[in-house]
Image (cartoon, rainbow, N blue to C red):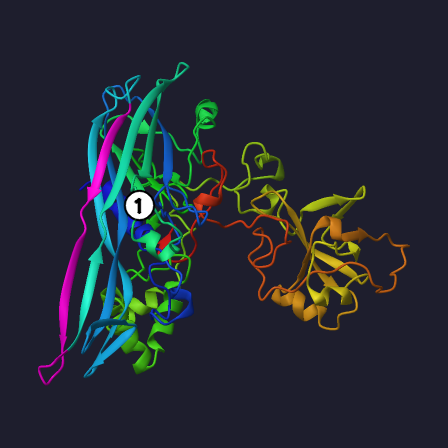
Amino acid sequence: MSVPMDIARRVADAVLYEGYLLYPYRASATKNQVRWQFGVLVPPGFTATAEHPASVTECLLEGAAYAVAHLNLRFLHVRTRGVERAEDDGYWPVQQLRNGHRTYLTFDEGTEREAEVTLPVAGLIDAPERVIEVRVPGDRVVEPIVAPSGEVIGRLVSEHLPLHATLRVSAEPVPGPYDLVKLRARVENSDRWQPLGAPREQALRHSLIAAHLIIAVNAGAFVSLLDPPEWARPAVETCRNEHTWPVLVGEPGHRDVVLSSPIILYDHPDVAPESPGPLFDSTEIDEMLHLRTLTLTDEETLEARETDLRVAELIDMVGSMPPELLERLHGAIRSVEEATGPRPPAPSAAGDLPSREETPAPWWDPAGDAAFPETGSVTVAGVPVSRGSRVRLVPGRRRADAHDMFLAGRTARVEAVLLDLDGSHHLAVTLDDDPGADLRRSHGRFLYFAPDEIEPLTDGSPAGDPAAGGTAGREPAAAGPPGNGPPEHEPATESATERSAAEKPAGGPRHDHPLGDGEVGA
């Protein structure tokens, strides 16, 4: 396996099991009652939820005249595991059955499935789409549960239902001088099951779970849809990706493998080297999950082990981790790169300093970012508002917090102007009459308001009376890092900056949304 494909498989495995089981990893935990949230392709006849029967991937290849495309469709297949107790008149389903020191639980598991196909790109151009049928047979396994006395007290019934999916692949040249080819792959659930009012749990047994594609080429190169070169941007804007998010994978600089993921990623994602193994929650911090898992009681640990074999392996991994590996989870610095080349000479005079145009400030430098919280500003009612500006709070009707009425009409000081990934401004403020304002300022704990929820105050403006009218902002649990906007609470009408690919517009990717600090990391 090549290095890019090896990295692609690691990231794809993290995507495949994202949310598979969440801490505390028990079947009885509330958060594990509604499962399978990403990349679910349901039968076309099931319309009780907003989940879709198909996904479409469109990506661009350059120099692909002699390329061969290798497509690997991967997904989980739901395997029901039912516990039945033996009675005089047969076997009856139960949620759990205890046998000595072991408890058998009714719970669903996931089985990995793959389908691969290799196609010459030249044979796809201006030709009928290639249709690959993917059929997975069903199976049923019955295991008796025997008591220490030798009596059969029940049985364990595990079952896969048959699955039928279709992969449709086509390609077309992109008009222009750049020798680009648009590759299109459609994955659809072709199951003819008729739900007739069946619940989602039954539909999932006929569904592709966490479905994604790994596409690799042996010649040519893919064009990044997140950060394309300017010459390719018009072609990128014609790509339409539905319920999936294709990104380049492999080492930075490599462009021969694409992962079309149901979760929003960035180009060249990888599993953090400190990550000890799958914890099924890539948006969470590994160290925290590790430490929380160690706090499970003996009863909780036993239930988690009986819930799923993969959880039992996770608990063994956490319990046997040596201290030196645990220390690696405590923190890592990734932004510092090794300096190469000769050190530039120190300037002999102020006139020798390079101009700003010659040495643009890096993205993290406040001087290079007009929207940096410390220096950003926004115009409200013709008045520029920035850090230090005094404002009156007039929260709008879209707020619904009962505590907001206490902030209406109060005056405040702007501490930062934030710009989120959706292009919306947010003002971080502290109240003028708050005796703990200095403490909140030092801890970065602010109240957040939209520009239309404040009125700028000039030096001569009266402070006003905190009267009724409207609603107000709320205080988040903790402030986020500068430049990322309000960390948890957003206005009800604003779009959240983190969502699944299925909630994005039908067009190709436009922004860089990493998963976070967990299993899949920069």
Placement of 484 over or under 217, stated as above or below = below
Q: Residue at x 28, y 62 (%)?
A: 108
Mark 1: secondary structure: loop
Outermost residue on the front side: it is 89
| Image location (x, y in percent) of residue 30 | 42, 69
From the top left corner, tell me how far across and down residue 2 is, in percent: 20, 40
Q: Is residue 219 in the magenta section?
A: no
Q: Amino acid at mark 1?
A: Trp
The residue identified by callout 1 is 193
Residue at 46% across / 47% down in the picture? Answer: 50
Instruction: Describe residue 114's horizontal placement relative to residue 440 as left or right.
Output: left
Q: Quadrant of the N terminus?
A: top left
The residue lying at 77 percent from left, 67 percent from top is 406
Q: Is residue 315 visible?
A: no
On screen, residue 38 versus residue 66, left or right, reads: right
Instruction: Tell me if I can see residue 339 in this picture.
Output: yes
Q: Residue furthest left?
A: 150
Q: Position of residue 376 (x, y in %)?
A: 67, 46
Residue interval drawn in magenta: 129-152
